[in-house]
Every structure is written in structure tokens, then in C-alpha cells.
Image: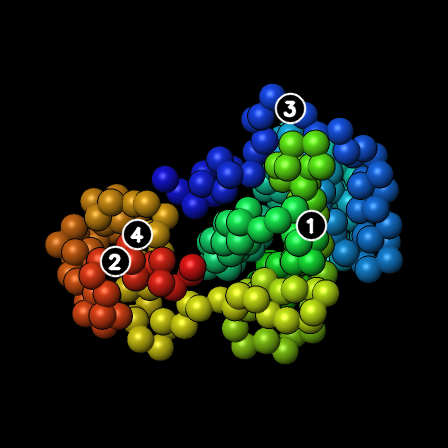
């Protein structure tokens, strides 16, 4: 199963007992944040499978249409924004958010509000060039059924100082990094081996990876064997998990 499909299965609330949080209150907060921070704010409702997108002038800098503001879409995935993210960073973003969900899912309700995701990712701007964007995400849980109800995402254009993407889960109360991205295999694996590893993590079989990369199945299997030897793990799925979880 693909990472995003796993996320959808975890995030979308299909329980019978509905959350009674007033969505209008959170819409107003998203609007205020977009104005105060010069941010693009995405409020996703897991109960209704909808998103509300509030745009500042930063959206125009990223080549995102200002026509509908706020915009309402029938999905928790803001495709216009997600489609602009560098493919490597998009995959890592999904994996990191799945990690975040699993971390909070194992906590008591009263502890969850202290945690958020902070990342720095590459997004194409209006000139079709990648620029650095700071992404923050907060989860809001239902007091009625204990399920995740809302995801609140902020995207701000960042200072162009990074040399690599950065993904962290932080405790904002204590000012501590709880989890930091562990994918540092770029210095160990070849670019092609990294591609193969990522496709393995998304659930593709060797034959499918061969088709996606326009190489033979034997070549894919050779890359998978090289990954095992270089990373000293038992299988390439484990290699992927060790990278991201």
C-alpha cells in the first residue's frame, strides 16, 4: 500500500460517533494566521474529508491561484500545493506525518497538544524554481470520540539558507526535538539505489519499479541486494523503515 493511502486510512474518521467541535472557530483561526504570518493555511477536516485553504500574498509567489480565497476542496489533500513539492520531500513529508500520527496516537489526549511537525521543504515558485518553504502542522483531536478531527498546516516562504530538507517533530512546551529525520543514506547509497529504496517503501514490487525506472527486473534486484549489503539489514523494506521511522 502506498504511503499516502496508509495516511488516508489512518487520518479519515469513519467512526459513527461524530465530533462536535465548531469548525467555524477553526476557520477563523486559519484566516487570522494567514494574515498575521503571511502564510498559506490549510485546515483539513478528517470527519468531512474536506480542506479549507486560506492564502496570503505568499501564494502568488509560489504560483498558486488567488482566485478562490478561501478555497474549499472535497479532500484532505491540497493537491495544488502538494504537486509543487519536490518529489523526494513530498514522500518524506507523507512518511513523517504518518510517524507523527503514530506517535500521538500512543499518547494520552491531554499530552497531544504539545507536539507539532516542523519541516523545511522545497516547493516550486511562480518561476518554476524550487525555493525553501517552512511547513508546520498541528493535530486537533475530538473531545467527543478521541479521534483526530483537524489538521492545521502553515506554509511560509523561508530564508534560503538550507542545504538539505529538514523534518522534525517537536515538543513546543519544552522546546525539545522529539524525532528528527534519520534519512542520511545519500552519502552511502547511489542516486539510483535511493530511488529503488523509496519505491520499495511505497510498496512497489521489483517488476513495477523496473517499469517506473525503465530498467530490467534483474537490475532492480541487483540494486536491492546492494542496498542490503551497504546498510547491513536483512531486507530492503527494513532498510526503508530504518531510514524513516
Q: Percent from the top left, x then y, of residue 144?
A: 70, 32
Distance between mark 1 and mark 4 Cα atoms:
36 Å
Callout in the foreground (1, 3) = 1
> In the rendered image, which residue does mark 1 sit on?
110
Does residue 162 show up?
yes
Helix, strand or loop under label 2 = helix
Helix, strand or loop under label 3 = loop
> In the rendered image, which residue does mark 4 sit on?
200
Helix, strand or loop under label 1 = helix
Label 1 Cα neighbours within 10 Å, binned few <14 / some 14-19 / many ≥20? few
> In the rendered image, which residue does mark 3 sit on?
17
Q: Pick whichever of labels 4 and 3 is earlier in the sequence.
A: 3
In the rendered view, would you say 245 is above or below 142? Answer: below
User: Taking 74 as reference, is 7 left or right?
Assistant: left
Distance between mark 1 and mark 2 Cα atoms:
37 Å
Q: Say whether marks 1 and 4 touch (CB < 8 Å).
A: no
Quadrant for residue 188, please give it. bottom left
Residue depicted at x 17% and y 62%: 225
Callout in the foreground (4, 2) = 2
Label 3 Cα neighbours within 10 Å, binned few <14 / some 14-19 / many ≥20? few
Q: Say whether marks 1 and 2 touch (CB < 8 Å).
A: no
Q: Say whether marks 4 and 2 touch (CB < 8 Å).
A: yes
Q: Percent from the top left, x then y, of residue 245?
A: 42, 59
> In the rendered image, which residue does mark 2 sit on?
236
Residue furthest to the left? 218
Helix, strand or loop under label 4 = helix
In the rendered view, would you say 29 is above or below 85? Answer: above
Amino acid at each position: 500500500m502506498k504511503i499516502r493511502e496508509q495516511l488516508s486510512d489512518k487520518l479519515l474518521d469513519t467512526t459513527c460517533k461524530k465530533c462536535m467541535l465548531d469548525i467555524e472557530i477553526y476557520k477563523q483561526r486559519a484566516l487570522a494566521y494567514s494574515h498575521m504570518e503571511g502564510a498559506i493555511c490549510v485546515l483539513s477536516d478528517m470527519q468531512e474529508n474536506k480542506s479549507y485553504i486560506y492564502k496570503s500574498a505568499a501564494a502568488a509567489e509560489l504560483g498558486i491561484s488567488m482566485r478562490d480565497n478561501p478555497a474549499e476542496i472535497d479532500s484532505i489533500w491540497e493537491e495544488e500545493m502538494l504537486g509543487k513539492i519536490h518529489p523526494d520531500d513530498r514522500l518524506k513529508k507523507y512518511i513523517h506525518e504518518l510517524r507523527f500520527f503514530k506517535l500521538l496516537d500512543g499518547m494520552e489526549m491531554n499530552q497531544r497538544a504539545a507536539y507539532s511537525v516542523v519541516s523545511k521543504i522545497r516547493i516550486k515558485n511562480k518561476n518554476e524554481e524550487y525555493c525553501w518553504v517552512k511547513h508546520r502542522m498541528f493535530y486537533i483531536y475530538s473531545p467527543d470520540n478521541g479521534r483526530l478531527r483537524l489538521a492545521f498546516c502553515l506554509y511560509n516562504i523561508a530564508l534560503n539558507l538550507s542545504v538539505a530538507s529538514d523534518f522534525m517533530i517537536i515538543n513546543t512546551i519544552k522546546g525539545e526535538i522529539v524525532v528528527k529525520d534519520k534519512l542520511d543514506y545519500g552519502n552511502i547509497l547511489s542516486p539510483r539505489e535511493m530511488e529503488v529504496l523509496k519505491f520499495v517503501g511505497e510498496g512497489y514490487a521489483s517488476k513495477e519499479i523496473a517499469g517506473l525506472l525503465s530498467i530490467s527486473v534483474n537490475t532492480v534486484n541487483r540494486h536491492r541486494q546492494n542496498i542490503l549489503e551497504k546498510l547491513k539489514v536483512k531486507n530492503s523494506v527494513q532498510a526503508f523503515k530504518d531510514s524513516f521511522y
